[in-house]
Amino acid sequence: GNVLMMVAEDDYSEIHKRIHLLDPNNTRKDSLYDVFILSVPELDKPLTLIKDDGVNGLHITDDAYEIIEGLSAIPDLAMVCIDPLQAFIQANTNDNMVGQLYSQMAQMIASRYDTAVIGVHHLTKGGLESQADIMQWRASIRGASSFVDSSRWCISASLCDEESGRQICLEQGEEYDRMKVVRVAMVKSNSESDMNVKTMIRKNGILQILQPKDEIKWEN
């Protein structure tokens, strides 16, 4: 289906560079569907979806409602991505009421258009390197716990330790880069899910899951 990406940190030029890195042969041009980009740096004014002010208190903004209505113009809408959440929220993200209101807005979009709504959110500084316990990862997601608690699922991604990163790059025949190897885990899910930690390596701009090595089967 079609996708809308709302991005606050990159202009169209940077986004096109990233897309070309993912698809250098332009195979996307043969797709039946499109990715629509709403880039805040290209707009005439900042875009806020959730706001807390002295006039209206904590509320979903008129701009947000306008965008929600406008989504009806995109047929076969499969996903809406908001990246990052913090940039679209003009309120205290440590307040659980803010997290709840954002989630209500996301659920409105998901229900109305039968689509996935994905919010990209930052970790605390302590969460930048993967932890032994995935619940520590969950606690490292920045802001109020309601951002996680009111979501249907949540995936956390962190860098692995430097020693492991170097070893994995060596095994994969890749030049070492501190940002190349990450650990990823589902840290919250409303349904049965694989909660095991996955290791991923970035190759040609794409994160690929490393499959666990086959166990040695000893003959009797």
Image: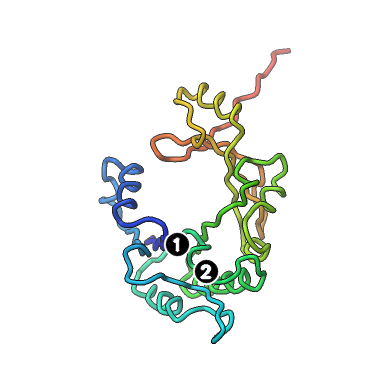
Residue drawn at (52%, 22%) of the image: 171
Residue drawn at (36%, 72%) of the image: 45
Q: For the N terminus, which image quadrant?
A: bottom left
- Mark 1, residues whose alpha carbon is within 10 Å: few (<14), some, or many (≥20)? many
Q: Is residue 20 left or right of residue 68?
A: left
Residue drawn at (42%, 71%) of the image: 47
Question: Which of the pair 196/206 is nearer the observer?
Answer: 206
- Residue 182, image x and y in percent? 55, 38
- Which mark identifies residue 79? 1
Q: Is residue 116 left or right of residue 101?
A: left
Q: CA distance from mark 1 to mark 2?
A: 20 Å
Q: Is residue 26 above or below residue 89?
A: above
Residue kind at label 2, given as amino acid type: Ile
User: Could you tell me which secondary element the residue under label 1 belongs to?
Assistant: strand
- Residue 152, image x and y in percent? 62, 62
Q: For the C terminus, which image quadrant?
A: top right
Question: Which of the pair 28/124 is nearer the observer?
Answer: 124
Q: Earlier in the sequence, mark 1 or mark 2?
A: 1
Q: Residue furthest top?
A: 220
- Mark 2, residues whose alpha carbon is within 10 Å: few (<14), some, or many (≥20)? many
- Which mark identifies residue 89? 2
User: Could you tell me which secondary element the residue under label 2 belongs to?
Assistant: strand
Residue drawn at (48%, 79%) of the image: 61
- Residue 50, image x and y in percent? 52, 74
